[in-house]
Amino acid sequence: MKGNGIEVGKCTPPVKDIIYIYRRSLRHFGDPMWWPGDNPWEIAVGAVLTQNTSWVNVEKTLRRMKTMGLFTPEDIRDSPLDVLAETIRPSGYFNQKARKLKVLSEWVIKRCGGDITRARSLRMDTLQKELISLWGIGQETRDSIILYALDLPTFVVDRYTVRILRRFGFDLSGRYEDAVEYIKALVEGISSSTQFLNRLHALFVLLGKNYCGREPLCRRCPLNSRCEMAKSVFKNEKK
């Protein structure tokens, strides 16, 4: 990959496929410019709120939090749980998410003195272990916080990513957790550029939302010339 020390001709087939997906999707969608947020803490809060909901609902929730004065880690920690839950109601699963935000806020206050950017000084393995140990912070949310809020090199693997790569032709037939670890290692081995990792995750989301949903729109997809599912669909159409 130009600018990241990758000679495509010397890469393994899976790496070539990832680079193709990145370049082709970037030409199709342009730079996604992710993740929206005014500051690292807002981005981290958004990573929790976006679990199982649309970004439209997250934006509405963030506006409500600002209006209510519930936005710093200290504000969230000190807020009555029922008040916080009602404020974030538009995000769905609001009782659970209110608890998750309180847990994350407590960690930021105790570990980082209230400034989440101080977590950048932690060793990556320490940061990963501490975040994943927090109640309600799963692998995807953890990696979103690390990549987007802290601007540190890790790749966010979500169900869109696994679905698209399976359909593209990657052998990801085992457990979902194993597929996630394989994809993370593969992508992070290509480049440690946070810009690349940021864009690639965002592009997978755009592909999943616009073309590779549960019912794929292969005819319109920008990857259809090399995707195994698309080839199969087109072959069946000719029969």
Image (tube, rainbow, N blue to C red):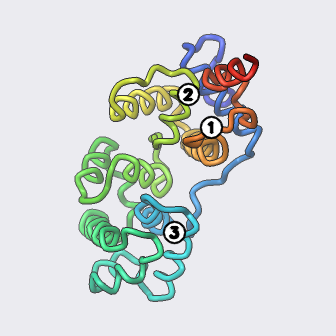
Side of 156 where 181 appears, left or right: left
Residue found at the very far top of the displayed protein: 10
Give whichever of 82, 75 is nearer the camera: 82
Q: Which mark is residue 58?
A: 3
For label 3, the SS is: helix
Residue appearing at x 36%, y 52% in the figure: 121
The percent coordinates of residue 16 (x first, y second) are 61, 19
Question: Which residue lies under the disc numbered 1?
Answer: 216
The percent coordinates of residue 180 (x first, y second) are 40, 34
**Label 3 amino acid?**
Val
The percent coordinates of residue 28 (x first, y second) are 76, 40
Q: Is residue 155 above or below residue 21?
A: below
Residue appearing at x 26%, y 67% in the figure: 103
For label 2, the SS is: helix
Marks 1 and 2, the one that precedes in the sequence: 2
Q: Which mark is residue 167?
A: 2
> Disc 3 and disc 2: Cα gap in Å?
29 Å
Q: Is residue 15 above or below residue 62?
A: above
